Amino acid sequence: MNPLTENLFYCLFYFFLLLLKTKSYLWVKYMTANQREELIFGLKRSVPIMIGYFPVGMAFGVLAADIGLTPFEAGLMSLFVYAGSSQFIAVKMLGISGDIMTIIITTFLVNLRHLLFSASLSPYFKEIKQKLIPVISFGITDETFAVSITDVREKSLSHFYFFGIYFTSYLAWIASTVLGSVLGSLIPDTKALGFDFALPGMFLGLLCIQIKNFKNLVVALLAGLLSILFMVLIPGNWNVILATMIAAFLGVTIEKCV
């Protein structure tokens, strides 16, 4: 670990130790040595996630400022939603005056993949108290899932590990979006700097990760073509929802028949 990363890690660890002073986090004071090691391990594993979050989070903040959201409003969205792709979609659709119901349904469909993430992690939650699982589940994102599922497959880890990795990543996302929003209010033309490509760029990256065989490629191309077709034929912003539902149905059919 290089000195910069090590210093960042220890700053995060000391932040958690400060929680000892608050009554609601008094349980941290009574951690065993093993639990403390798991917390530290989770903090270490969150560092690359946070490094990746900052440019994307700042891009979101800049786009949020571009449609008129204040840093406080952008921060609140990250605080309560904490789903990068959904936040990009919501901001983009708010910018073109999309109706609320369309935004809600679209972001719900986009986040359905979290059901698969949670289902994959659930076997490793057996030793974790039931009341803590909803709290931990809130911190599941594409990035935190990818790292944590690798770790729990190698060794048994408690909720201290998940708190360490999930909620430092969460704080980094909130901080980066607020910072991006503050800077975005100072940039007169965000499109000139390419920030408007952040959303399609993120989705292209996620799409490439998901395409693992020819069937996946066919379904992805069908979804894209259907979305373009519906955008031309159907007024409003229903093209994404319809294309997603039809492509998902076709994907299941192809999987069963081929």
Image (spheres, rainbow, N blue to C red):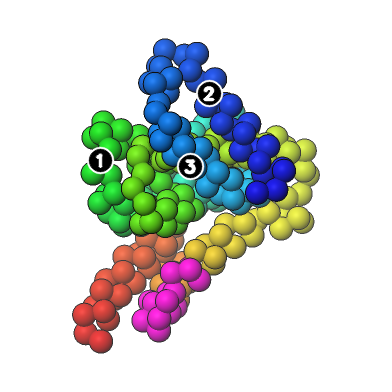
- Packing grade of label 2 (10 A; few <14, some 14-19, many >=20) is few
Q: CA distance from mark 1 to mark 3?
A: 17 Å
Report x, y in % for residue 191.
72, 55
State the residue at coordinates (51%, 37%).
40
Q: Are marks 1 and 3 in contact (CB under 8 Å)?
A: no
- Packing grade of label 1 (10 A; few <14, some 14-19, many >=20) is few
Does the magenta stretch mainly form a helix, a strand or a loop?
A: helix
**Closer to the camera in the image, 3 or 140:** 3
Q: CA distance from mark 3 to mark 2?
A: 14 Å
The residue indicated by pointer 3 is 42
Report x, y in % for residue 180.
67, 41
Report x, y in % for residue 144.
46, 49
Q: Is residue 206 above or below residue 168?
A: below
The quarter of the displayed image where residue 193 is located: bottom right
- Packing grade of label 3 (10 A; few <14, some 14-19, many >=20) is many
Q: Amino acid at mark 1?
A: Glu
Question: SS at mark 2?
Answer: helix
Q: Is residue 15 above or below residue 167?
A: above
Question: SS at mark 1?
Answer: loop
The residue indicated by pointer 2 is 17
The residue indicated by pointer 1 is 127
The quarter of the displayed image where residue 200 is located: bottom right
Which dot marks residue 149?
none
The magenta segment? 207-221
**Closer to the camera in the image, 215 or 192:** 215
Q: Are marks 1 and 2 in contact (CB under 8 Å)?
A: no
Question: Does residue 145 appear in this view?
Answer: no
Q: Amino acid at mark 2?
A: Leu
